[in-house]
Image: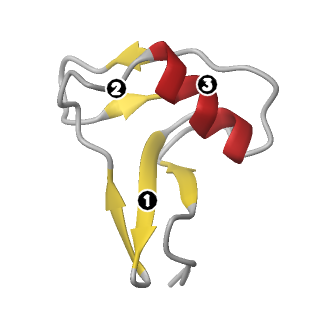
């Protein structure tokens, strides 16, 4: 189990490290960021910067809950 620091973000479930669902750590527990229509290109860009990626591409997943970066 990957224990994280509160406020940390990661991508999971992707076929490559730069792709996946966004998860946020809160008190050592990782939870997926749900698609609540408030996730924007700006929040995608900030999250990717936190993950040390130079840019981002937001894709809405119409089959499952959550956004894919």
Please tell me whether residue 54 is drawn above or below residue 47 in the rendered image: above
Q: Position of residue 10 (x, y in %)?
A: 57, 54
In the image, what residue occupies the spot 20% across and 17% down? 62
Q: Report the Cα–Cα distance between label 3 and label 1.
A: 15 Å
Q: How is the image coloured?
A: secondary structure
* Residue under the point 52% across and 26% down: 44
Give residue 45's mark: 3
Q: Is residue 52 left or right of residue 56?
A: right
Residue 39, which numbered label?
2
In the rendered image, which residue does mark 1 sit on? Answer: 24
CA distance for labels 3 and 2:
10 Å
Reading the chain from its start, which is encountered first: label 3 or label 1? 1
Residue 29, quarter of picture: bottom left
Residue drawn at (80%, 42%), measured in percent from left and top?
52
Q: CA distance from mark 2 to mark 1?
A: 14 Å
Q: Which of 45 and 57 lies nearest the eye of the viewer?
A: 45
């Amino acid at each position: 189990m990957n224990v994280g620091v509160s406020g940390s973000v990661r991508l999971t479930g992707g076929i490559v490290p730069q792709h996946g669902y966004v998860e946020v750590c809160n008190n050592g527990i990782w939870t997926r960021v749900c698609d609540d229509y408030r996730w924007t290109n700006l929040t995608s860009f900030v999250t990717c910067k936190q993950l040390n990626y130079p840019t981002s591409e937001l894709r809405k997943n119409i089959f499952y809950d959550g956004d894919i970066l």
